[in-house]
Image (spheres, helix red, strand yellow):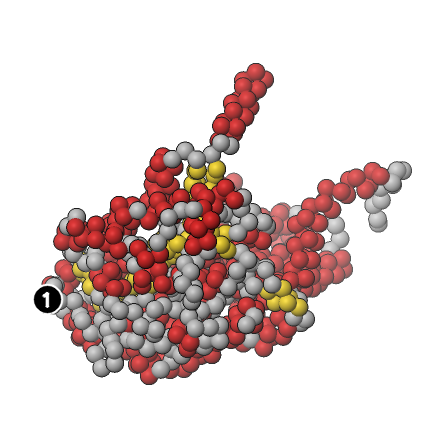
């Protein structure tokens, strides 16, 4: 490149950068991969095209843990993004970092943007709302736990493909048939700590932690080692020994075992629907999770997962106006309905749910409303969700203990007791740091 | 004999030292100082509140059985990586040195893995050994081995040890090969004339003469196993199952970045730093005593 063209290029760059100064850029850090990442970019593009004042720039920052760590590091370096996506287990950490965040309610009010918290589905928004009724973060992508099963395999095993197991004893019986007749590993689960302990407790209307699972205060302590949970983990350990449960990993690795046809039944997030739809070469069904019929109050509702969008402190005022506009945009029924249908995440507003229902989507895609149904059951204090400090750490502890159970190295009771004890140390530490 | 260069001005040596000092300051002294400082505090994730904790973070660590177990895991892992990496590399170098045909090709092939990023190496091996998809796992199952490193901690540790050693073999190989080539041919010929067989020649002449190289590699490999193997662990096991592969440096990451326990994580880095300083002291003492450059 000669000097003249270099100068021209530099001038051109200068021209572009001055042109872009007229619009306010809003950084949005997220953890969405694959088809979900495309969808996030599509949302940002749609918003950017709808007006000229603001430009939302999504940036992928790795998985949920890494995105949160990146956000924290950026805040400490005084360069936080305006919007940070934080997974649901990070909620307590964010809520208790008052100086680092700005509540959605405040952002909307200060920007003069119309905001009615009542339009959001209570079970979803409730999780991200403070005890005083202030909506803290924007519930962008909420999922819940559902049950996927391979209809072809059920047929092969001589089971009714339209009758997924309703209860755990039914599931155990079906699993044996799937193994003996269809010669398949019957069962696997994604996110074991979330699905088999957190959501399991809520679904059976029993507490995961005291103080209403942490909603009631920082002095909450873990109590998921009751006979019900111990019995459940013992049953799953038996399945491992029988060869009807194949463990695939701590996160969503196991769904690959399902869509490759290795395992006939899989529990996981409702947001896995897109990936399963894309990869499964067989007929599959989506159903609510099974329960133990002798447990009182079961089935309740399942627990919320996914992530929400937090507004970080320390940005120029103009950006917050744009954030408010963007949140209003995301709340539009047609945007929400499309997001819900293409990703399997829960619709955020009741209007979006109605719109989807009216469009005949649920008739065409049986099973897609299982997640919504699972969440609209009346929520109790035991099933509203789990909101504890250091929950990522607690999940990791549970993962470690459960792995020891599946490997046959620890008895279920011993492992759960140990997980409770180790987890409570984390909670004590969190209480000390968050000081109250 | 000491080599000495005499500078007439004072500013020139200072200037020449400056770039290195600047780099060390920015990438070592400042972060290390920060870690030392933070290890004495209890703080929340965002650094909004800091509470002086004294040595409490350290006390918690040394009463945590998980941390002591991590020390054990690290010891097994680094000894495994070092022994495996050094012995295989030495055997390969011994044979490559005596090759007559296709010398360069063979050497290039052996050095190849060194060019692969650790994370890629991890993923590569993971595909071979993945319990449900892996090719090697398939063979192992045919042999009747119940291969599942997602649940079996011993298998997981063996797997990451294997990968880490494999990555390091090329590096060790290069040094061993250079070491072998610098051994005077006359010595070996004399021994051969005296009737020493190839194995005897190796143990009585080659191995002792290689000892400075071996010692250097030993230290380098231990430091490698302590720190540079992080991406392999992260790609393959993430420290699991049930902490079976959680080496010290991975625990720093887990507690700091996933658990958001900055103080505890900083205390762990300080302990790691002390370990490395000790290793380096040992290395220099021995290198000074045993090796003449």
The residue indicated by pointer 1 is: A160
Q: How many marks?
A: 1
Q: Quadrant of the N terminus of chain A?
A: top right
Q: Work out whether residue A7 can be spotted.
A: yes
Tell me the residue at 59%/59% (across/down).
Answer: B47
For label 1, count other residues whose C-alpha is less than 10 Å away and answer few (under 14), some (14-19) or many (20+).
some
**Rendering coords of residue A102 (x, y %):** 49, 54
A295 to the left or right of B5:
left
In this image, A222 relative to A234: left or right? right
Q: Secondary structure at mark 1?
A: loop
Q: Position of residue B166 (x, y in %)?
A: 49, 55
Residue B86 in sight here: no
Q: Is residue B177 above or below residue A132?
A: above
The answer to which quarter of the image holds residue B134 is bottom left
Vertical comparison of A382 with B287: above or below = below
Q: Is residue B179 left or right of residue B285?
A: left
Split into 4 quadrants, where in the image is the C terminus of chain A?
A: bottom right
Residue found 10% across the figure and 66% down from its top: A160
Q: Where is residue A283 drawn, in percent x and y?
A: 15, 56
A409 or A255, which lies in front? A255
Between A56 and A8, the residue placed more toward the observer is: A56
Q: Disc 1 is attached to a residue of which chain?
A: A
Q: Nearer the viewer, residue B239 or A274?
A: A274
Residue A413: image x %, image y %? 37, 82
Q: Residue at x 43, y 73 (%)?
A: A216
Residue at position x 57%, y 19% in the image: A7
């Amino acid at each position: 490149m000669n000097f003249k063209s270099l100068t021209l290029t530099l001038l051109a760059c200068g021209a572009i950068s001055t042109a872009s100064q007229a619009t306010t850029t809003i950084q949005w850090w997220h953890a969405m991969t694959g088809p979900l990442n495309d969808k996030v970019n599509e949302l940002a593009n749609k918003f950017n095209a709808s007006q000229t004042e603001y430009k939302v720039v999504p940036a992928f920052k790795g998985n949920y843990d890494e995105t949160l760590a990146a956000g924290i590091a950026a805040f400490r370096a005084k360069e936080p993004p305006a919007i940070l996506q934080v997974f649901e287990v990070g909620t307590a950490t964010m809520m208790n970092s008052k100086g680092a965040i700005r509540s959605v309610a405040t952002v909307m009010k200060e920007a003069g943007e119309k905001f009615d918290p009542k339009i959001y589905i209570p079970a979803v928004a409730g999780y991200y709302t403070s005890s005083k009724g202030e909506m803290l973060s924007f519930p962008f992508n909420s999922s819940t736990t559902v049950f996927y099963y391979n209809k072809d395999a059920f047929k092969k095993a001589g089971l009714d493909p339209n009758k997924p197991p309703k209860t755990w004893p039914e599931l155990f019986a079906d699993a044996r048939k799937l193994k003996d007749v269809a010669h398949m590993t019957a069962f696997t689960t994604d996110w074991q700590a979330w699905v088999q302990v957190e959501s399991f407790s809520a679904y059976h209307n029993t507490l995961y932690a005291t103080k209403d699972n942490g909603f009631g205060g920082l002095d909450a302590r873990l109590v998921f080692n009751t006979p019900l949970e111990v019995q459940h983990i013992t049953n799953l350990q038996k399945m491992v020994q029988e060869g009807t449960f194949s463990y695939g990993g701590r996160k969503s690795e196991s769904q690959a075992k399902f869509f490759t046809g290795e395992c006939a039944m899989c529990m996981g997030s409702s947001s896995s629907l897109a990936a399963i739809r894309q990869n499964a070469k067989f007929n599959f069904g989506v159903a609510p999770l099974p329960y133990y019929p002798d447990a009182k109050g079961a089935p309740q509702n399942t627990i919320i997962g996914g992530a929400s969008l937090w507004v970080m402190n320390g940005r120029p005022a103009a950006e917050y106006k744009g954030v408010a506009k963007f949140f209003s945009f995301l709340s539009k029924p047609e945007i929400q309905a499309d997001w819900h249908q293409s990703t399997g995440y829960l619709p955020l507003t009741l209007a979006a749910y109605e719109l989807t229902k009216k469009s005949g989507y649920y008739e065409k895609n049986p099973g897609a409303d299982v997640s919504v149904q699972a969440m609209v059951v009346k929520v109790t204090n035991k099933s509203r969700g789990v909101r504890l400090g250091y929950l990522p750490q607690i999940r990791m502890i549970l993962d470690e203990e459960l792995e020891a159970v599946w490997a046959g190295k620890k008895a279920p009771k011993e492992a759960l007791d140990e997980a409770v004890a180790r987890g409570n140390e984390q909670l004590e530490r969190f209480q000390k740091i968050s000081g109250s | 004999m000491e080599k000495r260069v005499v500078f007439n001005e004072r500013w020139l040596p200072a200037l020449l030292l400056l770039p290195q000092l600047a780099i060390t300051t920015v990438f070592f002294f400042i972060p290390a100082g920060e870690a030392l400082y933070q290890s004495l505090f209890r703080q929340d994730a965002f650094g909004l509140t800091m509470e002086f904790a004294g040595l409490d973070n350290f006390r918690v660590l040394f009463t945590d059985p998980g941390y002591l177990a991590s020390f054990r895991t690290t010891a097994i892992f680094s000894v495994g990586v070092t022994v495996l990496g050094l012995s295989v590399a030495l055997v390969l170098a011994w044979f490559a040195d005596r090759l007559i045909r296709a010398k360069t090709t063979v050497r290039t092939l052996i050095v190849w893995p060194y060019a692969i990023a650790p994370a890629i190496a991890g993923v590569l091996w993971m595909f071979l050994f993945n319990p449900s998809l892996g090719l090697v796992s398939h063979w192992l199952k045919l042999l009747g081995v119940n291969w599942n490193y997602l649940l079996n901690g011993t298998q997981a540790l063996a797997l990451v040890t294997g990968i880490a050693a494999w990555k390091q073999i090329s590096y060790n190989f290069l040094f061993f090969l250079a070491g072998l080539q610098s051994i005077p041919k006359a010595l070996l010929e004399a021994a051969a004339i005296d009737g020493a067989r190839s194995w005897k020649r190796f143990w009585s002449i080659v191995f002792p003469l290689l000892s400075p190289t071996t010692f250097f590699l030993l230290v380098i490999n231990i430091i490698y196993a302590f720190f540079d193997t992080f991406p392999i662990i992260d790609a393959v096991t993430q420290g699991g199952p049930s902490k079976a592969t959680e080496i010290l440096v991975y625990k720093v990451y887990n507690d700091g970045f996933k658990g958001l326990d900055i103080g505890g994580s900083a205390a762990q880095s300080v302990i790691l730093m002390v370990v490395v300083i000790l290793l380096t002291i040992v290395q220099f003492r021995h290198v000074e005593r045993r090796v003449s450059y």
